[in-house]
């Protein structure tokens, strides 16, 4: 494990990815894109774990990455199933049309 | 004999329970028999116990029966213990004996009443509470009885509750006595705090050791206990409820508001005499209050037209005598006067009740008249009662008891010429208003048609009481003739003797003066109301006399005074605070919460993006704070 790439840069990349993910969740109207953005956020945090694990030479970083990977897979499968159901019932994937609370 | 004590209050309690639970399903006769029978049984037990007590005086000077421990908190362990000594024996005897006669009378008196089960139940409960009051060995149990008789007094004054004035009178009696009771409760708290117990014997033993005579704490305690006594016994300044309490049925007035409950104050002071002896100031106050009350009430009695109100004011005045006696240290004389007064005042109230019943519920004496011929038994018994009240010399019991008080108010070490003179003036007034009542009620022309005549059930109790009103005085004759002291022998073990001032002599002269005063009072009333009634009629034309008449008729306008000083300001403040000033603060809190809720509910839009933004902003906010700090 050498430090060709400084940890700061990796963390910065993770932060940029995370912010992009969040921006996607906030801005996008389509649920599928929102789900994609959530995946990007998950991967951003996973990247941060990997970098931290590499920095201190600990295995926990990679353990956490496996966890996140599994969780992301589960999340995507359930999320896509829900989205399919929503589309069946409402014939739309626009989050603003789907909202039912009056506030 | 000790183990019979519980039967004395037990029988009235059983009577009360039977009448309350099953009264509606019993026949009228059965209700009357239960009501009167329970008290008669109790009276018989008292006679047996009392006889034994007098024949074989117990070594300890009392009978004590502990029934059970009431409750236990740390070291404070009041028990339900009945305690009978000479003093409580006198009270128990008077209570059960007179109550039995009054209950028998009530069977006839209540014959037309629909709700007689409630009447007898309340009366039995009253007798139970009163017996608990006088038999209690600790002040807590005494206070239970004390509050119990107050409750029964309230229930029975308002017996005819359909008329709203009666309910008002009942509430007035209850609330005014409550003022005194509260003071008394505070006094009990101080006693517990000081002695750690409320046992009367224990307190009486340790008080003189713990407290110096005249010390502040003794005076405070004595004054607080006195306040309780003043409320119950209708003495100045808590006396205004008694005349209105006459709204109740006549047997109630006879039993509760003449013979027993109103003398509970006398009992309390006599029972706690050790504490009062430690505070000479309080003793002096008692004497002054007694003297003031007997004059104020006596002068009011002289102008009343309602026969029961005359008797009510007279009761206040006679209890004033008892307080005067207690104040000057003539303990035994006060209790003796209590006993005699119970006999003749119960007699007068019962007789007045019979007259009122016979004249279709007419209370106004001026509409009676001429009853001498038509109601001979009532006339003679009423005459005997009146004679005893006026203290007619030698033949009546009232003379012997009142003479003692007059003598001690001069001669005892607490006495003074002023107290003696006031008492003497009171004797004059008593004789005058009693004679006036007799003349207006029984002489002259009949003004109301006579209804039903009282039957045997009513007249026999009257006759028995009349006999006692005459002969009961002979058990305690003055030192200078007869010198019979049967009564003092009963009480001397409990109550201290009266100290006579050294430089006093000539009891005989004072007796003659008292006799002459009584006769002068009778003669004055005889002149004014029989021989020359024009004097009174002329007086009624003068404005100042009429004003004085109104002033006395209303009981020295005490009601008006209290109305202005206490009731009005409180009502005014209550009106100011109608919508609760303090509540405004809490209403403000609810208003604010409501507003905040409305504002925040706007954010719950269901828009996922807003939620995420919220989360994000929150997270950034927290991170920023962490970085900055």
Image (cartoon, coloured by chain):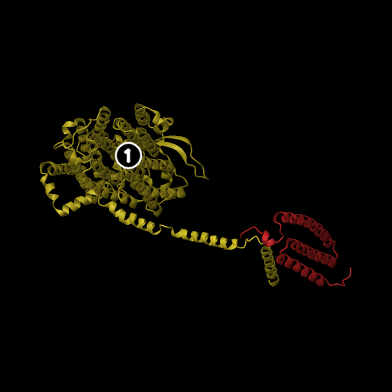
Chain colours: A red, B yellow
**Rendered-image quadrant of the N terminus of chain B:** top left
Q: Is residue B499 visible?
A: no
| Residue B314, above or below B587 | above
Residue B178 versus residue B464: which sits nearer the camera?
B178
- Could you tell me which chain the residue with mark 1 belongs to? B
Report which residue position mark 1 lands on.
B160
SS at badge 1? loop
Please provide percent x and percent y for residue B416: 25, 50
The mark tally for this picture is 1
Q: Is residue A56 left or right of residue B541?
A: right
User: Which residue shows up at 46% across the image and 59% down it?
Assistant: B582
Residue A92 versus residue B237: which sits nearer the camera?
A92
**Rendered-image quadrant of the C terminus of chain B:** bottom right
Q: Is residue B505 left or right of residue A20?
A: left
User: Which residue shows up at 51% across the image and 61% down it?
Assistant: B591
**Disc 1: CA contacts within 10 A as few (<14), some (14-19) or many (>=20):** some
User: Which residue shows up at 39% across the image and 54% down it?
Assistant: B216
Q: Is residue A42 left or right of residue B149?
A: right
Please provide percent x and percent y for residue B101: 30, 31
Residue B124 versus residue B540: which sits nearer the camera?
B540
Please provide percent x and percent y for residue B517: 17, 44
């Amino acid at each position: 494990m050498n430090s060709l790439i400084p940890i700061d840069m990796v963390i910065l990349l993770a932060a940029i990815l995370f912010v992009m993910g969040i921006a996607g969740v906030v801005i996008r109207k389509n649920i599928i894109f929102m789900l994609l953005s959530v995946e990007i956020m998950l991967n951003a945090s996973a990247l941060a774990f990997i970098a931290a694990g590499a920095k201190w030479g600990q295995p926990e970083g990679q353990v956490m990455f496996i966890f996140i990977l599994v969780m992301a897979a589960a999340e995507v499968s359930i999320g896509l199933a829900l989205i399919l159901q929503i589309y069946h019932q409402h014939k739309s994937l626009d989050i603003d049309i789907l909202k039912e609370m009056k506030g | 004999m000790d183990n019979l004590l519980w039967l004395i209050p037990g029988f009235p309690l059983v009577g009360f329970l039977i009448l309350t639970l099953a009264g509606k399903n019993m026949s009228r006769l059965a209700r009357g028999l239960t009501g009167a029978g329970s008290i008669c049984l109790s009276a018989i037990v008292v006679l047996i116990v009392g006889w034994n007590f007098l024949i074989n005086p117990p070594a300890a000077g009392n009978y004590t029966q502990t029934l059970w421990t009431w409750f236990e908190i740390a070291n404070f362990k009041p028990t339900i213990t009945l305690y009978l000594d000479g003093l409580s024996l006198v009270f128990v005897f008077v209570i059960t004996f007179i109550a039995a006669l009054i209950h028998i009378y009530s069977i006839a008196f209540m014959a037309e009443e629909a709700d007689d089960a409630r009447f007898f139940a309340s009366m039995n409960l009253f007798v139970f509470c009163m017996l608990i009051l006088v038999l209690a060995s600790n002040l807590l149990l005494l206070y239970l009885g004390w509050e119990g008789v107050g409750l029964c007094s309230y229930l029975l004054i308002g017996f005819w509750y359909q008329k709203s004035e009666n309910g008002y009178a009942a509430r007035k009696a209850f609330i005014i006595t409550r003022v005194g009771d509260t003071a008394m409760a505070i006094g009990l708290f101080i006693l517990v705090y000081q002695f750690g117990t409320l046992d009367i014997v224990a307190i009486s033993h340790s008080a003189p050791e713990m407290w110096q005579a005249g010390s502040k704490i003794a005076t405070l305690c004595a004054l607080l206990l006195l306040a309780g006594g003043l409320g119950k016994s209708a003495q100045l300044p808590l006396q205004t409820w008694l005349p209105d309490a006459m709204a109740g049925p006549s047997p109630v007035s006879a039993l509760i508001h003449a013979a027993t409950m109103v003398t509970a104050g006398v009992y309390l002071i006599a029972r706690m005499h050790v504490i009062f002896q430690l505070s000479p100031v309080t003793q002096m106050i008692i004497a002054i209050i007694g003297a003031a009350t007997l004059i104020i009430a006596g002068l009011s009695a002289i102008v009343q037209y309602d026969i029961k109100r005359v008797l009510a004011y007279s009761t206040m005045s006679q209890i004033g005598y008892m307080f005067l006696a207690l104040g000057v240290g003539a303990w035994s004389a006060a209790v003796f006067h209590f006993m005699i007064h119970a006999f003749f005042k119960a007699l007068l109230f019962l007789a007045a009740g019979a007259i009122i019943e016979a004249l279709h519920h007419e209370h106004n004496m001026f509409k009676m008249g001429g009853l001498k011929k038509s109601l001979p038994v009532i006339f003679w018994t009423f005459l005997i009662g009146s004679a005893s009240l006026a203290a007619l010399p030698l033949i009546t019991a009232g003379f012997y008891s009142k003479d003692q008080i007059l003598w001690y108010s001069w001669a005892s070490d607490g006495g003074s010429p002023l107290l003696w003179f006031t008492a003497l003036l009171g004797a004059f007034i008593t004789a005058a208003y009693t004679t006036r009542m007799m003349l207006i009620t029984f002489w002259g022309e009949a003004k109301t048609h006579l209804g039903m005549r009282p039957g045997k059930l009513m007249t026999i109790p009257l006759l028995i009481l009349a006999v006692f009103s005459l002969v009961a005085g002979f058990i305690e004759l003055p030192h200078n003739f007869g010198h019979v002291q049967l009564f003092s022998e009963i009480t001397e073990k409990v109550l201290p003797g009266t100290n006579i001032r050294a430089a006093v002599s000539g009891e005989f002269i004072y007796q003659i003066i008292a006799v002459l005063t009584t006769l002068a009072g009778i003669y004055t009333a005889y002149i004014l109301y029989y021989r020359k009634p024009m004097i009174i009629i002329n007086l009624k034309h003068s404005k100042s006399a009429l004003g004085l008449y109104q002033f006395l008729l209303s009981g020295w306008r005490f009601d008006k005074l209290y109305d202005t000083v206490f009731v009005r300001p409180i009502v005014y403040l209550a009106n100011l605070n109608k919508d609760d000033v303090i509540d405004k603060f809490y209403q403000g809190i609810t208003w604010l919460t409501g507003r905040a809720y409305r504002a925040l509910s706007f954010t719950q839009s269901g828009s996922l993006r807003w939620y995420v933004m919220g989360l994000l902003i929150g997270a950034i906010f927290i991170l920023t704070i962490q970085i900055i700090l």
